[in-house]
Image (cartoon, rainbow, N blue to C red):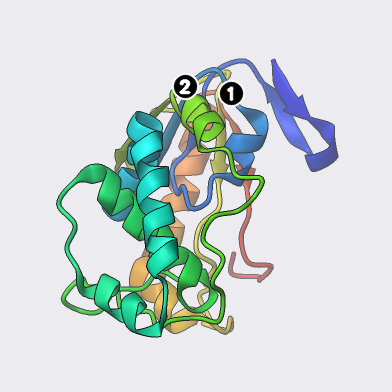
Amino acid sequence: MVSNPAFDIPCFSGRYIEPILGGGAIFFYLEPKTAILTDVNHRLIETYQGVRDNWIKVEKELKRLQNRHSFQFYYEERKRVRRLPHMRAAQFLYLNRTCFNGLYRENLKGKFNVPIGDKDRIIFEDEDFGKISQVLKSAKIYTSDFEKAIDQADEGDLVFVDPPYNTAHNVNGFIKYNQQIFSWQDQVRLQKAIFRAAKRGAKILLTNADHDSI
């Protein structure tokens, strides 16, 4: 059984399922024995897979990128297409940690287009890639629509969902970008998928916008 009363996370005896992965903070806190981690962003997913499967090479490459970091290098790296999995994983982390507000956004051609931010810390002192890799080995990690992942949930499982926040009335400040990656129709699909999972006996932990439409 896994639980954490301080965060109101319900006890569960089955799998931990996170269908919109993002930073995976709850997963890494709980360190569940079995998990399903998915997201539609294949670059994010292959980063997790890269750290899980070859963390030493990812960390080494990330340190190399840190040593070369500058305004010019950031934009050069943003345009590069890395071929090897561990290099793509390190590139994703480098760009995420040095871009504006840690934002992930693509243009209409599918190219990452966030400008450089004001942070230059890429390697954190308390970051243990070896430990992260070990925790990730308990999980199946793959690219998927959230509904397909939630539909796997059954009795005893815990589903944690943290979707992009948007509302039917478009009142939140980041709506234009959010609607591109998670529409109101997706909110409706999410609701129905959660209800189905709950009826099968899965437990649900959900974050979302505090709005009447939600």
Residues under numbered marks 1 and 2 in contact, where contact means CB atoms less than 8 Å apart: yes
Q: Which of 151 and 196 is in front in this view?
A: 151
Q: In which quarter of the image is residue 5?
A: top right
On the image, the x and y values in percent for residue 106 come to: 29, 74
Q: Quarter of the image containing the C terminus? A: bottom right
| Label 1 SS | loop
The residue shown at (49%, 51%) is 191
On the question of residue 174 being in view, the answer is: yes
Label at residue 32: 1
> Mark 1 or 2 closer to N-term?
1
The residue shown at (35%, 50%) is 61
On the question of residue 41 being in view, the answer is: no
Q: Which residue was labeled with disc 2?
A: 138
Give the Cα separation between the discs numbered 1 and 2: 7 Å
Q: Which of 144 and 61 is in front in this view?
A: 61
In this view, 168 is above or below 65: below
Give, as a three-letter code, the residue at label 1.
Answer: Pro
Q: Nearer the viewer, residue 41 or 192?
A: 41
The residue shown at (51%, 61%) is 122
Left or right of residue 136: residue 61? left
The residue shown at (52%, 40%) is 195
**Callout 1 crowding tier (Cα within 10 Å): few <14, some 14–19, many ≥20:** many
Give, as a three-letter code, the residue at label 2.
Answer: Ser
In this view, 40 is above or below 31: below
Residue with the most extreme right position = 6
In this view, 134 is above or below 101: above
On the image, the x and y values in percent for residue 98 come to: 47, 71
| Label 2 SS | loop
